[in-house]
């Protein structure tokens, strides 16, 4: 009984120390309106127990807003502010879901959490310059001898029609060749296509949108071949939600999110990417392919060694 009485103060002391580690949100600024594919700023201030670090939980970032930049500033030993820049990826009313901030010690142990409030945000289309007072000062274009041009076009179509039917009547019926199916592993196909893309000259000729479109097609095709998941028509936010269901891709979702954000900026916001950014995005796709490629079994390894 005496030992139990002596342990009671120690238990209360431990509970007091644990409860002293706190984190609270003191200010939150989230706009109610934003424009599609335009930067969207969020400001959050937090008060926390001094001596610990405050970080954002990446798992809690909203799916309809892509995080572009994060600026953290310590206002005092017990207060910190976050200036976050997001990119809206869906039109209409989107919910800016709650973002978790975690209090950590030097060993990355989570001691406490604070959560922002959810808020609906109206995402509008980008407004273009329109002035009703502008007038077209060019004279109307009237083609000369339009009937002659029409007659020439009609004759050209008739010539093409007769040539086509003559070719169809004289050629031999040849059975259509079956499409050759690529039976190589998904990772080998993806890495080969990335190499061909880098050799295609699209980047050197400043075809940045087409370059990133082809790179994303390679990534989506690899996800389909490797995990039998058709994401060819998914938006970036939908693709990220599917990735969270694949255990092999969960550790890489931060890198994939950054790559998809960079790709969307080039394809939809017409951002001109820098050379280091392109190299980083190529490296991200290669890393995903190499990290999730199936490892050969012991039997396959023995066969390869026997062949060598």
Image: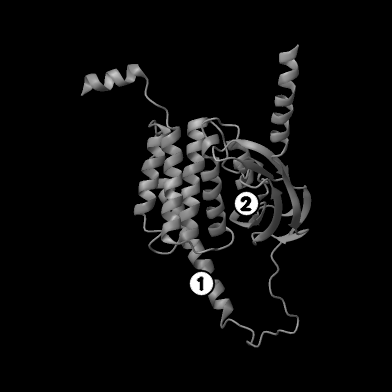
* N-terminal label among 2 and 1: 2
Q: Is residue 161 visible?
A: no
Q: Is residue 36 above or below residue 171?
A: below
Q: Nearer the viewer, mark 2 or mark 1?
A: 2
Residue 221: x, y in percent? 49, 40
Q: Nearer the viewer, residue 289 or 140?
A: 289
Q: Which mark is residue 183?
A: none
Instruction: Answer with left or right where residue 16 lies relative to residue 166.
Output: right
- The kind of secondary structure element at disc 1 is helix
Which residue, given by chain and number where applicable, does mark 2 sit on? 66
The location of residue 253, given as percent across then percent down, is 55, 40
In this picture the colour scheme is one colour
Where is residue 32 drawn, in percent x and y?
A: 78, 58
Kindly identify the residue that appears in the image at 55 percent across and 30 percent down. Answer: 247
In this view, the residue in front, 175 or 93, is 93
Point out the residue furthest to the left here. Answer: 308
Q: From the viewer's perspective, tell me whether residue 188 is left or right of residue 12.
A: left
Q: Which quadrant holds the N terminus?
A: top right
Q: Quadrant of residue 299?
A: top left
The numbered disc on residue 152 is: 1
């Amino acid at each position: 009984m005496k030992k139990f009485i002596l342990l009671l103060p120690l238990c209360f002391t431990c509970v007091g120390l644990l409860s002293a580690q706190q984190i609270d949100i003191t200010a939150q600024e989230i706009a109610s309106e934003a424009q599609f594919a335009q930067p969207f700023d969020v400001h959050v201030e937090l008060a926390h127990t001094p001596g610990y670090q405050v970080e954002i939980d990446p798992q809690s970032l909203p799916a309809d807003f892509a995080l572009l930049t994060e600026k953290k500033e310590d206002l005092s030993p017990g207060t910190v502010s976050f200036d976050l820049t997001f990119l809206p990826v869906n039109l209409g009313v989107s919910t800016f879901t709650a973002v978790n901030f975690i209090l950590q010690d030097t060993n990355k142990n989570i001691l406490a959490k604070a959560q922002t409030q959810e808020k609906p945000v109206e995402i509008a289309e980008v407004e273009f310059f329109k002035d009703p007072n502008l007038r077209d000062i060019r004279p109307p274009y009237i083609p000369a001898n339009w009937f002659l041009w029409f007659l020439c076009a009609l004759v050209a179509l008739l010539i093409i029609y007769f040539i086509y039917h003559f070719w169809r009547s004289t050629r031999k019926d040849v059975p259509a060749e079956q499409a050759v199916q690529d039976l190589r592993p998904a990772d080998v196909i993806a890495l080969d296509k990335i190499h061909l893309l880098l050799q295609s000259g699209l980047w050197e000729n400043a075809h940045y949108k087409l370059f990133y479109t082809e790179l994303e097609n390679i990534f989506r095709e690899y996800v389909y071949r490797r995990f039998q998941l058709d994401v060819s028509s998914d938006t970036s936010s939908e693709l990220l939600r599917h990735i969270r269901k694949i255990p092999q891709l969960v550790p890489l979702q931060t890198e994939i999110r950054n790559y998809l954000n960079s790709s969307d900026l080039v394809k939809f916001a017409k951002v001109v990417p820098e050379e280091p950014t392109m190299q980083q995005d190529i490296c991200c796709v290669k890393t995903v392919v190499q990290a999730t490629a199936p490892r050969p079994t012991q039997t396959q390894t023995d066969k390869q060694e026997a062949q060598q």
